[in-house]
Image (cartoon, rainbow, N blue to C red):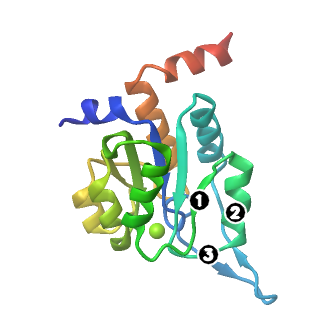
Amino acid sequence: MNLPERLARIEMLVCDVDGVLTDGRIVYTDRGDEIKAFHVRDGSGLKLWTSLGKHAGIITGRRSAIVERRAEELGIHAVVQGAADKKAALVQMLAQLGLKREEVCVVGDDIVDLPMLRVAGLAVAVADACLEAKEDADYVTQAPGGGGAVREVIELILRAQGSWQAIVARYRE
Ligand SMILES: [Mg+2]
């Protein structure tokens, strides 16, 4: 399948967190807290995405209350943290929602994401992903993780499906 055909089928977007929704840095404070920085346009893009009735999910190998909070803020209900097997988490997520593999786009940045990238209908690696993730991806973003990569993917899919233009027109009225 070529890229336009893959893009046309996507109904769900599943993102890794560290290095995809963030730039990959995990900042520790003296108080033992962790700090992650998210990109505001990834967030607004995800809100637009779900407002169209599309599904969004998060699968991360780590665990953090910050992720819970960000997901809640964005209305993302499918969240798996501490996923030892990201592919299994993805397959289960799709089964619960009744979606096919061709209908999911996965965005990753590292080796641990390869198994879930390889089952996705559209595999995306961020610009600063590891080499292998980029090799296995159907699309590599221009933007780096935490720098609008997820927004870029959302726009790419919605443009291909013809909905992005309608969204923009609504805001330009
Ligand atoms: Mg990662």
Furthest-right residue in this view: 31
The residue that mark 2 highlights is 68
Question: Which image quadrant for residue 134?
Answer: bottom left
Q: Can you say which quadrant of the picture contains the C terminus? A: top right
Residue found at x 44% / y 58%: 92
Determine whether the beta carbon of the residue marked 3 sits less than 8 angstroms from the nearest atom of ligand 1.
no
**Amino acid at dot 3:** Arg
Q: Residue at x 58, y 21 (%)?
A: 167
Do tag 1 and tag 2 residues touch (Cβ < 8 Å)?
yes
Residue picked out by circle 1: 79
N-term mark: 3 or 2: 3
Disc marking residue 106: none
Q: Quick one: label 1, few (<14), some, or many (20+) residues within 10 Å?
A: some
Circle 2 packing at 10 Å, graded few (<14), some (14-19), many (20+), is some
Binning the other alpha carbons within 10 Å of mark 3 as few (below 14), some (14 to 19) or many (20 upward) gives: few
70 up-or-down from 84: above or below: above
- Asked if residue 126 can be seen in this view, the reply is no
Residue type marked 1:
Val
Q: Name the residue beneath numbered marker 3.
A: 63
Please, what secondary structure does the residue beneath circle 3 have? loop
Q: Identify which residue, 1 or 101, lies in the foreground.
A: 101
Label 2 SS: helix
